Image (spheres, grey):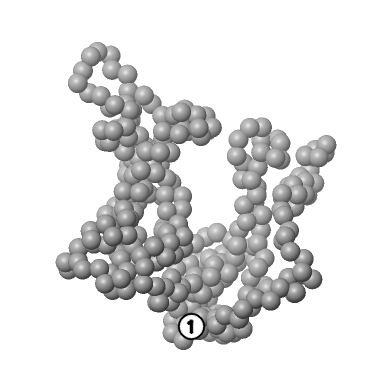
Amino acid sequence: YDDSSSTNPVDAANLFSKFSSSIYTSSLFSDALSSNIKLPQFIRPYHQNYILDDVSKSLCSLRNIKSVGPIGLQGRFLFMLRDIIAWPLFLIFRKSIDSGVFPAALKFGSITPLFKSGDPKIITNYRPITILSHLSKIFESNAFQGFVLRSSSEFQLASPFKALYCALVRLLLEYGSVLWDPSTACASASIERVRRKFLRIAAYRLNIPHPPCDYSPFLRVLNLSSLADRRHVSNLSFLSNLLSSKIDFPFLLFLINFCVPSRTTRCSIPFYIPRSSSNYYENSPIVRLIRTANNDPSFAR
């Protein structure tokens, strides 16, 4: 990178650091300019229901997390100390929410280079990924808890309510869904539970008549589809882009086996799925993609 090369791990890390710094763009406004801008005062949302139990539940979610953040603390280690650190963390988070200042110690993150494609010896073929600490993620989740419902309490139209849901809720539920699309009904229902909660609140706020436990009227009024249907479309779209070379990933393309019958039959499935002895392989992303395509009559027929 920049006419420099190295085989030393320290020098290579410095080259990655230099590359990551070069693609970072600073703020468009200087401090002097921003200080002269007169902005209206807004009332910060007061988390009156934010209690110690919220922090404890967030720490319990780290039970099986073995990753280490930039501060060098494993998620499972924080889970084991949850009874000791829950109260100090609650005081810090409570003070931060009341003052409107994010703790500086939680702003640190580690940059990890993620290889995209091309020559692995060229630094520009890597994408810098920021890894945040577990504590900063806990604080962020607690701070945004109920944000959509609080900020939309005065909404009378469906369009702004839907925009908040699609931008802040559904976007997180669908992130990387091609990889982690759940294979069990229980896991899929736990994700759909978030969407159903939004639909119940929307029906109450917008006065949408509906039969008990029937969410189809909400979907028609808000023009929304289920998360399972959206994941299905996303899987087919990814596979189609991979086969048409819109996604340049030769290794994944190598794993796809086309079904070429030795004689003319009525079977018209486009892909061959090898037999598997475990559910882990059967529900792996690439096998799930080609199985979804085989079961969809509109794909490559």
Q: Residue at x 54, y 32 (%)?
A: 248
Quadrant location of the N terminus?
Answer: top right
Q: Residue at x 33, y 62 (%)?
A: 195
Quadrant location of the C terminus?
Answer: top left
Instruction: Tell me where residue 253 appears, x and y as whole percent.
Output: 46, 29
Name, please, the residue furthest toward the top. 263
Tally the marks: 1
Q: Is residue 292 left or right of residue 119?
A: left
Instruction: Tell me where residue 242 appears, x and y as whole percent.
Output: 46, 33
Instruction: Tell me where residue 119 appears, x and y as whole percent.
Output: 66, 32
- Does residue 120 appear anywhere in the picture? yes
Q: Residue at x 59, y 65 (%)?
A: 133
Name, please, the residue furthest toward the right. 3
Which kind of residue does numbered mark 1 sit on? His
Residue 37's place in the image compared with 175, above or below, is below
Name, please, the residue furthest toward the left. 211
- Residue placed under numbered mark 1 in the picture: 47
Taking depth in this image into account, of 120 and 82 the one nearest to the observer is 120
| Residue 226 image-quadrant placement | bottom left
Residue 22's place in the image compared with 189, above or below, is above
Instruction: Tell me where residue 173 appears, x and y as whole percent.
Output: 41, 57
